[in-house]
Image: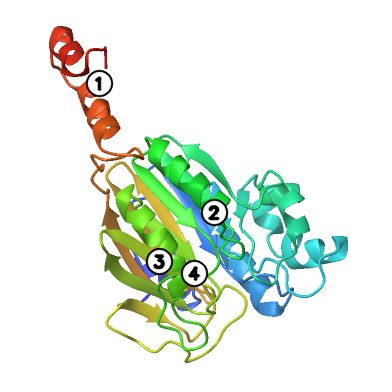
């Protein structure tokens, strides 16, 4: 997809690869970037970091989601500096908040690193804007405790936009790893049941957008520093894929839609579009539909006497 130029005087800048990030670009929306498999400390990581800082001048995103493999190799203080703090210095100086999850190359000590905002936990949730909730999971250690936690969090969330992010993709057409079927069997029923809008993962060092599965949109963003050229094997699942260069994704939530744009290291727009706000599930609480119905009644305009009479108590 070609880089868009909006006036003849900008042609030279467009040819230079600068992204004039539109999306809707509304002042009160929640904007964030997504990167995955980043922590090499190599040239590609620094170039993507510089591109993100340039894009932010046009689209002032507030947060960055990191999809794991945040540090390859060493995990000491020097590594945090050369593989995170320096590549994204422009964003950190601007006050952008990073939210990380652990990949298979990450040490558990990362969850206590303050700039990753994990709260010393390997899974957590944050609510960065009205009607937006982010749920970070540890797909390396998905045990019964974590599954019970994510179900409870999703069930009790009243956010219109629920976004889940973790490292290993449950849908992927890449040859190296592909779809993690064990994780899919555990997580997908919860995503569908509780109205998750978007799921983000890395691990495969490519960009891929999956066709919506049972109303849930899936993205693989695992090529923001590491890259496997030509690794995507397009399948019936694939809506769009890019494996010729490193890439990241910009997202903006504006009331009833989430807008996205995948951008290469050189500034080329490789995918873009929008996702409509998911319908709120009626059965949005665990253990049956009674509680979901109660929420609807609480919000309804039925007279109090009628609402009290349904289950013998005020709703």
Residue under pointer 1: 298
Cα gap from disc 4 to disc 3, whole angstroms:
41 Å
Lower sequence index among marks 1 and 2: 2
Q: Residues within 10 Å of mark 1 (few under 14, many from 20)?
A: few
Q: Is residue 195 above or below residue 285?
A: below
Residue under pointer 3: 185
Residue under pointer 2: 144
x and y percentages locating residue 98 in the rendered image: 62, 52
Residue at the limit of the structure toward the bottom, as seen here? 230
Cα gap from disc 2 to disc 4, whole angstroms:
46 Å
Cα gap from disc 1 to disc 2, whole angstroms:
32 Å
Q: Residues within 10 Å of mark 3 (few under 14, many from 20)?
A: few
Q: Nearer the viewer, residue 36 or 60?
A: 36
Residue 18 numbered tag: 4
Cα gap from disc 3 to disc 1, whole angstroms:
34 Å
**Quadrant that contains the C terminus:** top left
């Amino acid at each position: 997809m070609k880089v868009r130029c909006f006036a003849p005087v900008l042609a030279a800048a467009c040819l230079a690869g600068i992204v004039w990030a539109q999306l809707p670009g509304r002042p009160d929306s929640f904007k964030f970037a997504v990167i995955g498999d980043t922590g090499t400390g190599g040239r590609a990581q620094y170039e993507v970091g510089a591109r993100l800082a340039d894009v932010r001048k046009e689209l002032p995103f507030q947060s960055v989601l990191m999809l794991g493999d945040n540090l390859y190799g060493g995990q000491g203080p020097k590594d945090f500096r050369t593989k995170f703090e320096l590549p994204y210095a422009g964003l950190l100086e601007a006050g952008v908040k990073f939210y990380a999850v652990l990949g298979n190359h990450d040490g558990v000590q990362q969850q206590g690193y303050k700039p990753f905002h994990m709260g010393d936990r390997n899974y957590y949730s944050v609510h960065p804007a009205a009607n937006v909730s982010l749920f970070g999971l540890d797909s390396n250690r998905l045990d019964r405790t974590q599954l019970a936690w994510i179900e409870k969090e999703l069930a009790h969330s009243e956010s219109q936009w629920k976004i889940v992010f973790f490292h290993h993709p449950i849908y992927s057409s890449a040859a190296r790893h592909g779809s993690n079927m064990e994780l899919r069997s555990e997580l997908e029923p919860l995503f569908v049941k509780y109205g998750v809008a978007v799921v983000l993962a890395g691990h495969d060092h490519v960009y891929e957008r999956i066709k919506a599965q049972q109303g849930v949109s899936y993205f693989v963003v695992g090529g923001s520093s590491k890259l496997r050229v030509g690794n995507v094997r397009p399948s019936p699942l694939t809506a769009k894929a890019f494996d010729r260069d490193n890439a990241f994704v910009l997202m903006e939530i504006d009331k009833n839609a989430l807008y996205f744009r995948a951008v290469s290291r050189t500034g080329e727009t490789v995918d873009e579009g929008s996702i409509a706000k998911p319908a709120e599930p009626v059965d949005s609480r665990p253990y049956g539909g009674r509680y979901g119905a109660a929420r609807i009644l609480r919000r309804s305009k039925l007279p109090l006497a009628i609402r009290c009479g349904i289950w013998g108590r005020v709703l």
